């Protein structure tokens, strides 16, 4: 993922934009994968402020919940 973040920062990101943060949220059959990459010396800027960042485990749990809800919604459309 860092390779893609570096590429984006070099060739796509505009000069007035902050460095890229990479986040992968991937649902597996009975699990989820959460990976985060930050630039060196990251001074994170956010549109919305939160008192804490969710843990990887919390993100995995939420991702599984969202995926399950999406599957239920999709099966209800038939």
Image (cartoon, rainbow, N blue to C red):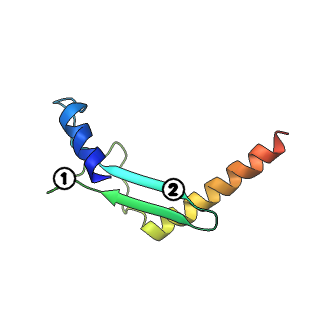
Q: Residue drawn 58% across and 67% down? A: 31
Residue 54 occupies quadrant: bottom left
x, y percent for residue 76: 83, 44
Q: Residues within 10 Å of mark 2 (few under 14, many from 20)?
A: some
- Image position of 17 (left or right of 78): left
Task: Reply above or below: 17 against 25.
Answer: above
- The circle drawn on residue 26 is 2
Q: Residue drawn 20% across and 53% down? A: 39
Q: Quadrant of the C terminus?
A: top right
Q: Going by the picture, which residue comes out furthest to the bottom?
A: 57
x, y percent for residue 63: 56, 58
Q: Residues within 10 Å of mark 1 (few under 14, many from 20)?
A: few
**SS at mark 1 in the image:** loop
**SS at mark 2 in the image:** strand
- Which of discs 2 and 1 lies nearer the camera? The answer is 2
In depth, the one of 42 and 46 nearer the eye is 42
- The circle drawn on residue 4 is none
According to the picture, the residue beneath numbered tag 1 turns out to be 43
Inter-mark Cα distance, 2 to 1: 26 Å
Q: Residue drawn 58% across and 61% down? A: 28
x, y percent for residue 10: 18, 36
Task: Reply above or below: 74 against 62.
Answer: above
Q: Residue drawn 19% across and 54% down? A: 42
In depth, the one of 66 and 54 nearer the eye is 66
- Image position of 73 (left or right of 23): right
Q: Earlier in the sequence, mark 2 or mark 1?
A: 2
In depth, the one of 52 and 65 nearer the eye is 65
Task: Reply above or below: 56 against 27.
Answer: below
């Amino acid at each position: 993922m860092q390779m893609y973040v570096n590429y984006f920062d070099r060739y796509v990101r505009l000069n007035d934009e902050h460095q890229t943060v990479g986040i992968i949220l991937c649902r597996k059959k009975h699990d989820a994968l959460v990976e985060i990459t930050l630039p060196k010396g990251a001074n994170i800027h956010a549109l919305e402020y939160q008192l804490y960042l969710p843990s990887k485990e919390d993100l995995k749990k939420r991702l599984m919940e969202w995926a399950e809800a999406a599957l239920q919604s999709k099966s209800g459309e038939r």
